[in-house]
Amino acid sequence: MDIFDTFFNVPVLIRTFPLLMSGLWITLQIGVVSIIAGLVIGLLLALVRLYAANWLQVIAKIYINFMRSIPLLVLLIIIYYALPFVGIRLSPFMSAVSALSLVSAAYTAEIFRAGIEAIPKGQFEASAALGLGYRNTMVDVILPQAIRIVIPPLTNNCINVMKDTALASVVAMPDLLKQATQAQALAANPSPLIGAAIIYVAFLWPLVAAVSKLERSYAKADQ
Amino acid sequence: MEGYISIRNLRKQFGNFTALHDVELEIAEGEVVCVIGPSGSGKSTLIRCINLLEPFQPESTITVGGTKVEAGRNLEKVRADVGMVFQSFNLFPHLTVLRNVMLAPMRVRGLSVPDAEKRARDLLTRVGIGEQADKYPGKLSGGQQQRVAIARALAMDPKVMLFDEPTSALDPEMVGEVLDVMKSLAGTGVTMVVVTHEMGFARQVADRVIFMDGGRVVEIGTPTQIFDTPQEQRTRNFLGAVLNH
């Protein structure tokens, strides 16, 4: 057996390809739902963290620090294996999405906060002086400017969420990694794992490249 | 006599530092008042209190057109009626010049897009930048940006215009074009409070000049009184320093 038969066994790859594709579909579903939920919750969390009543700000800050400190795998296992003891039973899909969104929201909140805080004070003052209320100030003036600043770090966060979807395999979610390990067992050959790795990289490489490109073009525009 | 803008017992603390000591000031409707004085004398802080960009001590009161300036329901109404022009322009960089001027009338006054656009184009023409309406602020010179900022404030049809050193950040050759717009505004019925270092403008356009120093109003009078026969030694020292060089 040479290295090609072991890791790049084409007949095995062809045979297990449909399995990997069904796994990829699940992975994309988990990733996209978690990213969108994380963005929405994260933006609200950032606004609470910056502008809400003091005690709410403290709660938001505790939430953010907690979610950034806890290992995602630990959180996922708690949600899937511990919550049923208090009557909360989530499906593997919901467990994975909950864990990923809760953590992604914390990172997203910090990214949005940094973006909003980077907007000069004069923009807030000009809005206030014109009589714009809080909602219009945010929607029409501050957030459109902050979005530009936060797109590269947000894209980075999306990449991390997509990669972390692989953890869903520990709660029996038939995602890309889980399907690959199963296919490996069935075929008695690790080529499906390599296939999965290639698929992850093929999907995320363009995103990684896009972040670099954005950062370069922003750096140029700011000169 | 109670003025259109009435400032009573105005105190402002920054921590232990008192920026304004018990300022009393009545400004009549349609009056043009210039505030002069050395840096750090509290001029900017004074006018920033009028629309509550700076919160002040609770025992102080400011009213504009009979409405108390305080946090809460009335504040957005006061601010909608009080325009402000900043030293650093503070245009919205992600919106075109036209959209900068249209935004607040649409959001605060509820104007339709065509009405807001017509109003914005008229105002931009009036301040001499009608043909730049579709550019972004970053493409304009400082003087042009400041004229857009004046048009943006005027689009709300304000009763009061506050100018916070509107020409201090401009290259010298652009000061004139902004002062000309401000001159054309004086006498149109809008009450103007102008913090400025342009003594020529103050002398020519102001109904009254206020000299401030150390967070206090030292002297108030007509331009002739302040510039030609100042009563206070501090006023004489300041004018001597800025006029004879």
Image (spheres, grey):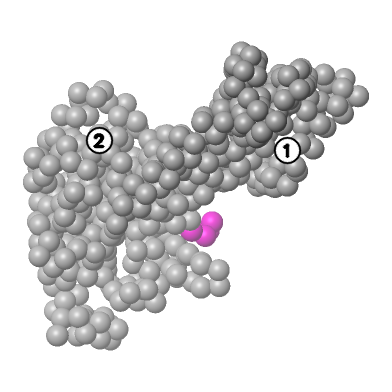
Circle 2 is placed at which residue position?
A: B99
Circle 1 is placed at which residue position?
A: A72
Please provide percent x and percent y for residue B28: 25, 53
For disc 1, the neighbor class at 10 Å (few under 14, some 14 to 19, many from 20) is: some
Please identify the residue farthest to the front as the structure is shown: A1
Q: Quadrant of residue B15?
A: bottom right
Please indicate, yes or no, whether residue B67 appears anywhere in the rendered image: no
The amino acid type, in three-letter code, at marker 1 is Leu
| Horizontal arrangement in the rendering, residue A170 relative to residue A43 (left or right) | right
Where are the magenta residues, as a range? B56-60
| Horizontal arrangement in the rendering, residue B204 relative to residue A49 (left or right) | left
The amino acid type, in three-letter code, at marker 2 is Arg
Is B84 placed above or below B207 here?
above
For disc 2, the neighbor class at 10 Å (few under 14, some 14 to 19, many from 20) is: many
Q: Quadrant of the C terminus of chain B?
A: bottom left
The CA span between labels 2 and 1 is: 45 Å
| Residue at (35% x, 52% y) in the render | A219
Q: Quadrant of residue B234?
A: bottom left
